[in-house]
């Protein structure tokens, strides 16, 4: 089915992004995966073609674009290229929106030019050891001391935590025995602050080019001017960005599943089995037909959600439905496409193997599939 949400400007931008990916990402991805992170100069290169500053106001060097469709183009093309750049995508799709929504004028002056030109990289530190999805159970504390907060605690599974210059830390600034969600605040920790300790770059089964860190805050003195938004209102602020964050994960899931199908089609046409192409067998045709149908269903959901997001009507429950369907579908489709590859699909030199490993986490981060079902069922009055 023909997509109707993009204009000629979007498609021209898509061509530029595709060429950039072919030149700067595809040939370098194995090296980045071996290193466990994306080099810092990559952020400068993406800034040069306008990716970093799409939604940053033009007075700070950005594009001043309100629509999320240009962002969508970028992350679709990365996925179509069978690549996963978790830290980069979290920096721009997950963290930057908090600055756009809640940063004050002085904070914008300090940080937005760096976001736009690629000199600043960001991360967000929510998850703690033993806490997982229970965000209201955060134990990291920030105690006010004059013009500063004294920050103490530990975070884990922090995407982009090794590279980040700015880390938004979810910390407890007060305690309400009646409501655990109250009293959480967002503090922006800068990379050179004394007491901010980056632990090891965690070794993962997938998303290997994305640095994932353990972070420790040992009496870090964070200036009160680095408080993002309102003190004690972090839970509400985090919930505000969840629909876009979850839609972003769905977009990537759909795009990488599309890449898997394309890889499987190419492989099936070239691979000879019993003297004829694998693509000639009825089972191969049926499996790939099933996959194509699933992709189409996911695309319809994503496109409608993008229209709703730009229109300000995408609800948390609807975003949860899109993420749930697309990430579960991603797993089914990529698994089937790996099966088409047979034994070769299990070899890491084949892109389908990387897609298979990378896909597993999308049903966990941004809210697990079980959390998505809980959000959806609650919206149904259950």
Image (cartoon, rainbow, N blue to C red):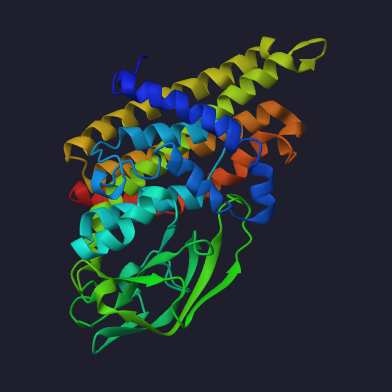
Q: Is residue 99 visible?
A: yes
Q: In which quadrant of the rendered view does residue 183 lie? A: bottom left
Relative horizontal placement of residue 160, taking residue 173 as reference (left or right):
right
Query: Compared to 76, does 92 lie above or below?
Result: below
Q: Is residue 369 visible?
A: no
Where the N terminus falls, by quadrant?
top left
Q: In which quadrant of the rendered view does residue 326 lie? A: top left
Query: Compared to 66, does 280 lie above or below?
Result: above
Residue drawn at x 42%, y 81% is 153
Q: In which quadrant of the rendered view does residue 309 lie? A: top left
Rendering coords of residue 61 (x, y %): 31, 46
Kindly give the residue lying farthest to the bottom in the view shown: 145
Camera-nearest residue between 29 and 276:
29
Relative horizontal placement of residue 150, taking residue 154 as reference (left or right):
left
Rendering coords of residue 200 (x, y %): 61, 70
Rendering coords of residue 136 (x, y %): 30, 71
Rendering coords of residue 242 (x, y %): 29, 52
Relative horizontal placement of residue 31, taking residue 1 as reference (left or right):
right
Residue drawn at x 23%, y 83% is 175
Q: How many marks?
A: 0
Residue drawn at x 28%, y 57% is 98
Kindly give the residue lying farthest to the right in the view shown: 275
Residue drawn at x 82%, y 13% is 274
């Amino acid at each position: 089915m023909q997509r109707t949400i993009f204009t000629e400007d979007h498609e021209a931008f898509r061509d530029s992004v595709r060429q950039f990916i072919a030149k700067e990402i595809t040939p370098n991805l194995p090296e980045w995966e071996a290193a466990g992170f994306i080099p810092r100069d990559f952020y400068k290169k993406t800034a040069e073609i306008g990716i970093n500053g799409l939604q940053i106001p033009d007075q700070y060097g950005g594009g001043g674009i309100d629509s999320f469709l240009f962002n969508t183009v970028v992350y679709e093309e990365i996925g179509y290229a069978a690549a996963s750049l978790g830290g980069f995508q979290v920096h721009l799709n997950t963290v930057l929106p908090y600055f756009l929504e809640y940063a004050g004028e002085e904070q914008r002056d300090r940080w937005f030019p760096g976001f736009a030109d690629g000199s600043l990289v960001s991360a967000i530190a929510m998850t703690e050891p033993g806490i997982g999805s229970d965000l209201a159970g955060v134990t990291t504390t920030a105690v006010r001391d004059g013009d500063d907060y004294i920050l103490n605690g530990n975070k884990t599974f922090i995407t982009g935590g090794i590279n980040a210059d700015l880390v938004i830390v979810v910390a407890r600034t007060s305690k309400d025995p009646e409501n655990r969600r109250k009293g959480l605040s967002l503090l922006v920790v800068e990379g050179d602050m004394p007491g901010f300790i980056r632990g090891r770059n965690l070794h993962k089964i997938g998303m290997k080019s994305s640095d994932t860190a353990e972070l420790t805050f040992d009496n870090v003195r964070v200036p009160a001017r680095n408080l993002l938004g309102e003190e004690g209102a972090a839970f509400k602020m985090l919930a505000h960005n969840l629909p876009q964050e979850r839609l972003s994960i769905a977009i990537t899931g759909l795009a990488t599943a599309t890449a898997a199908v394309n890889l499987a089609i190419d492989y099936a046409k070239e691979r000879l089995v019993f003297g004829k192409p694998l693509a000639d067998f009825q089972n191969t045709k049926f499996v790939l037909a099933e996959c194509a149908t699933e992709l189409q269903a996911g695309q319809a959901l994503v496109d409608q959600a993008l229209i709703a997001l730009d229109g300000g009507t995408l609800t948390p429950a609807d975003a949860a439905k899109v993420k749930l369907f697309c990430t579960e579908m991603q797993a089914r489709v990529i698994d089937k496409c790996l099966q088409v590859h047979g034994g070769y699909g299990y070899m890491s030199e084949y892109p389908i193997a990387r897609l298979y490993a990378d896909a597993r986490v999308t049903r966990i981060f941004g809210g697990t599939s079980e959390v998505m079902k809980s959000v959806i069922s609650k919206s149904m009055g259950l």
